[in-house]
Image (cartoon, rainbow, N blue to C red):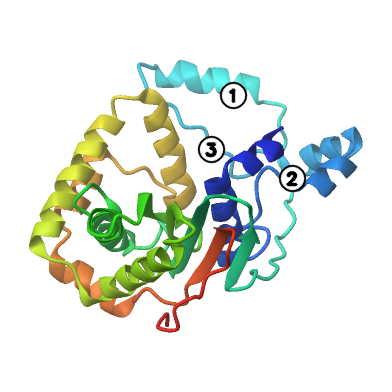
Amino acid sequence: RELRAIEDDLAQKVMQTLRRQQYPSPYGRNVQGQKNSLERITSDHIRDHYQALYRPNQAILGVAGKIEWEPLKEHVGNLLADWEPADLPAVDEGDCESSYIHLPEQSVQTHIGISSPSVPYSDPDYFQARGAVGVLSDGMSSRLFTEVREKRGLCYTVYASCHTLRDRGSIMAYAGTTTERAQETLDVMTAELIRLSEGIYPQELQRLKARVKSALIMHQESSTARSAAIAADWYYLNHVRSIEELASIIDQLTCESINAYLEAHQPRDFKVATLGEQALEVPIAIP
């Protein structure tokens, strides 16, 4: 059912393709699997997979809310006492898919995905990258929103975000547009990604800081979101960042620090995925 649902969500379909282009197998795989593989799975396969891989090695439990730590720890220990660790198999990396993939689709829309290598969340420069991408995409005053949607009216939805794995990361950008305006949309998006290496400006950073800090405050009103953040921090960093620490990191961002990061990590080596009636011409100006 989930696989069939993806066929109706063309934006998700193109971004799943982009992930396979950006990351080697198995990291770029669709978590829902593939139809031919799912059809071959038996209950024995599932049982063997569970017994081999679902082990407490590096398992993380994040809890947030009004709790008493010692009783909670004792209760979890009792529940999982018979969960035994085991050696986990090494991950064999495959290859990434090609730099440009077009998925033919009879649709009035064309969906565009663009990615570029970046640093992972565990990297000391992650928030420099996050600041740069925020200028590109956070809010109605961001560059992509202004240049792609407001000035040219090329699409309704356009965004970019930082995507991270444990040891690698990327910038992922998306736009949904019409067939007639798809090529211009791709051209403008790639131009804005490349222009980012020229640096950001104080007013852009000021707006970004206000948005990010506001989002941090709102984030803490949900114990579900906070527990997920705790688990993610431990997974990526082996420690948990407090809200105060995150706010301090944001406060310390400057145009100089972000621009120095961008000079050393210019968006390049783009991967492009499109879905629609016509394939597009990937701009030759892409480094």
- Mark drawn on residue 77: 1
Q: Can residue 271 be seen in the rendering of this structure?
A: yes
Residue 86's tag is: 2
Name the residue nearer the viewer: 144 or 135: 144
- 207 horizontally vs 225: left or right: left
Q: Mark 1 or mark 3, which has the lower sequence index?
A: 3
Question: Which quadrant would the C terminus be assigned to in this image?
Answer: bottom left
Quarter occupied by residue 96: bottom right
Residue 23: percent from left, percent from top: 58, 64
The residue under label 3 is: 60
State the residue at coordinates (39%, 31%): 225
> Is residue 99 placed above or below 185 in the rendered structure?
below
Marks counted in the figure total 3
Pointer 3 or 2: first along the chain: 3
* Residue 118 rendering spot, x and y as whole percentages: 41, 67
Estimate the spatial distance between the alpha carbons at disc 2 and disc 1, rounded to whole Å.
18 Å
Is residue 165 something one can see in this rendering? no
Task: Please tell me whether mark 3 or mark 2 is closer to you in this view.
Answer: 3
Relative side of 116 to 42, left or right: left
